[in-house]
Image (spheres, helix red, strand yellow):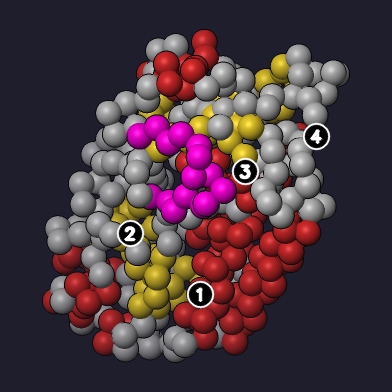
Amino acid sequence: MGTFSRRQFTVASAAAVSLAATGQVAAQATPDASPAASPSAGGWTFTDDRGRTVSLPAMPTKIFADAGAGLALWDLGIKVVGLAGYPDVFEIPEGLADVPFLSVEDGLDLEAVKALGTELIVSQSWDTVNNNDFGGIDEGLIPGILEVAPTIGIRALDVSVATSLARFEELAGSLGADLSAPAVVEAKAAFAAASDEVRAATAEKPGLTVVAISANADEVYIGNPASASDLMYFAELGVGFMELTGSADIVSGLFQELSWEQVGEYQADLYLNDDRVYGLTDEQLLAQPTFALLPAAKAGQIGPWSVEYITSFQGFTPILTTLAETIRNAEIVTG
């Protein structure tokens, strides 16, 4: 199987999903944040997670972003002027209801991006191999994208979510966001408190083993905590993920593909099940004979895995809160 990014991965076809392409962002605050700063006469420079440095004569105020990046910036006080992505992946907040959303199901309309006056394109990179691959579409395969505006890429894989959050903070601050605004400070504190909840929950359950799973009727994919940013952060908080050591190949470093006959290679105490609409529900998982035989399945110890998330304090805090509760409700049922 060829390589594909986490955003391209779907349990239905093992090949689709969320583009992060170009963008303009109007640097204006959310209702709870202070107005963004005016463009600086001294110019604007930012080095992204590819090591690419973008320098502009003034701070950009028209930024187009992929949906995930645009929503992350919004939570920090930066309003984008356009979003790109697959429909219905994220709920668009009311404050961005007036922002054009360009579907990428049939490719990205660069003329529409240009018409917004784009000065900067911000995206998340979901590919473990190609840092220029935004949500599964290679920047090098979109003719003319760099003629519209320079691109900024923030890593969404191979680094912890905490690292990605810090990078979005840095970027938003450089774009004029008031990072001392009450909404931002409160969201950051809530994230820290939720992280502490997970630490406490894992400390209460030493030795509890966990596996993140995404499945369809034909195959099972095991999430790799060594590269998936959310799982990496969970592990930092003490979650005891099983290492990927089975017999099947690891796809693009992100998932280990197994047959249903091989699922017994990962007998964990708790399974986190991909909660996207095209994955198997918990009930459908339990209807798989080989999975139903596993100790955690018999104990009903299955929790949600929110594979699609917004990389912001507001976006990730509920995930941590749910994870802490899930771990507290689980018991060691293996060995």
Name the quarter where the N terminus is drawn: top left
- Give the number of the mark in front: 4 or 1: 4
Q: Residue under label 3, please give it.
A: 73
Instruction: Specify the label residue 37 is tagged with.
Output: 4
Q: Residues within 10 Å of mark 4 (few under 14, many from 20)?
A: some
Q: Residue under label 2, please give it.
A: 276
Q: Secondary structure at mark 4?
A: loop
- Circle nearer the N terminus (3, 1): 3
Q: Residue under label 1, please give it.
A: 322
Which range of residues does the magenta coloring cover? 89-103
Provide the major secondary structure of the magenta segment.
loop
Q: Secondary structure at mark 3?
A: helix
Q: Secondary structure at mark 1?
A: helix
Please report contact status of discs 3 and 4: CB closer than 8 Å, yes or no.
Answer: no
Q: Secondary structure at mark 2?
A: loop
Expressed as whole percent of the image width and height from the top left, the position of residue 155 reads: 56, 40
Quarter holding residue 212: bottom left
- Specify whether 283 is left or right of 182: left
Q: Which residue is situated farthest in the front direction here?
A: 98
Q: Amino acid at mark 2?
A: Arg
Measure the C-alpha gap from mark 3 to mark 4. 15 Å
User: In terms of depth relative to the viewer, which is nearer, 279 or 26?
Assistant: 26
Q: Magenta stretch: residue 149 in it?
A: no
- Give the number of the mark in front: 3 or 4: 4
Q: Amino acid at mark 1?
A: Thr
- Specify whether 6 is left or right of 258: right
